[in-house]
Image: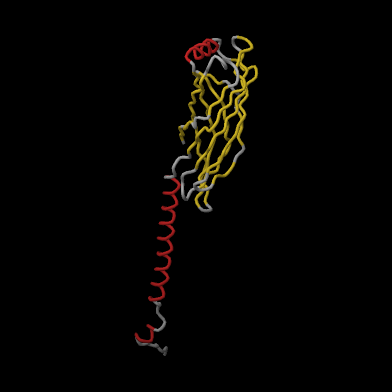
Amino acid sequence: MSQIDIKSPKHCAKKGFNFNFLNKKLFKILSTLVFSILSFILLIWFILHPAKPQFIIQEIDVYQLNFSSPHILNSSIEITLEARNPNKRVGIYYDELQAYASYKGQQITLHTPIPPYYQGQQDSNLISASLVGNGLPVSPSLGYEVGRDHALGKMILVFKFDGRIRWKVASWVSGSYRINVNCVTILPLTPLNPTGFLSSKQGTQCSTDI
C-alpha cells in the first residue's frame, strides 16, 4: 500500500516565493527605467532647443574687383568673421564649411573651404578666409551695375557661408544639420577708390538658418 505524505500549509509556505525581495528588485528596475527616460527626455530637449550660433563680419578688405572683359571678372577679397556660440550647455562642431561672395545675385568668387573645428559652450572664434575669383564668367550687365553703384557711392556685397554642424551635449553628439549664413555688407565708394582697394570694419550682423 502506498503512503501519502500530507504536509501542513505552514511547511509549504517556507518554500514559497520571497515577495519582499521581488518587490524591491522590481522597484529598482522601475526606478532605473524612469530615470533613464527622464534623462533621455532632458537630453532631447537640449538637442532640439539650442540657440543658433551667431556670426558677425568684423572686417572686409577688397583688393581686386574689376573686369578683364565685359563678362570676365577678377576678384580678391579678405574677410574676418566672428562666430559665437551662445549656448551654456551645448557645444558645436562645424563641418564642411564653405564661403563665397556674391554681388547683385551673382557669385563673384569661388567657394573657399574653411577647416572644420569644435566650438565650446559660450565660446567665440575668429575665422579668416581669402575669397578669390580669377577669370570668373559673369553676366555682361554686372559691369553696368558696378558703374551705377559708383555713382550712388556705395556697393552692397553678400557673403555666404554654407556647411553642416553637429550639436554636442556632454559626451553625446547629434547628427548633422545644414547651416546657411548670410551676411549683407555695404562698402562705401569714393572717387578715390572707384575700382581699387575697399575696406570696411562695420561689424555686420549676419542671419543664420539651420
Quadrant of the rendered image containing residue 27: bottom left
The residue sitting at 60% across, 21% down in the picture is 197
Front-most of 192 and 110? Answer: 192
Colouring convention used in this rendered image of the protein: secondary structure
The x and y percentages for residue 128 are 60, 34
> As rendered, which of 169 and 152 lies closer to the eye?
152
Question: Residue 198: horizontal and vertical position, in percent?
Answer: 57, 22
Please determine whether, in this image, residue 77 is positioned above or below residue 123.
Answer: above
Q: Nearer the viewer, residue 148 or 120?
A: 148
Please tell me which residue lies in front, 149 or 143: 149
Q: Quadrant of the N terminus?
A: bottom left
The single residue placed furthest to the left in the displayed view is 9
Q: Is residue 134 above or below residue 6?
A: above
Image check: 144 left or right of 39? Answer: right
Measured from the top left, where is residue 159 in percent x and y?
A: 53, 27
The image shows residue 203, relative to residue 145, as above or below, that is: below
Q: Quadrant of residue 126?
A: top right
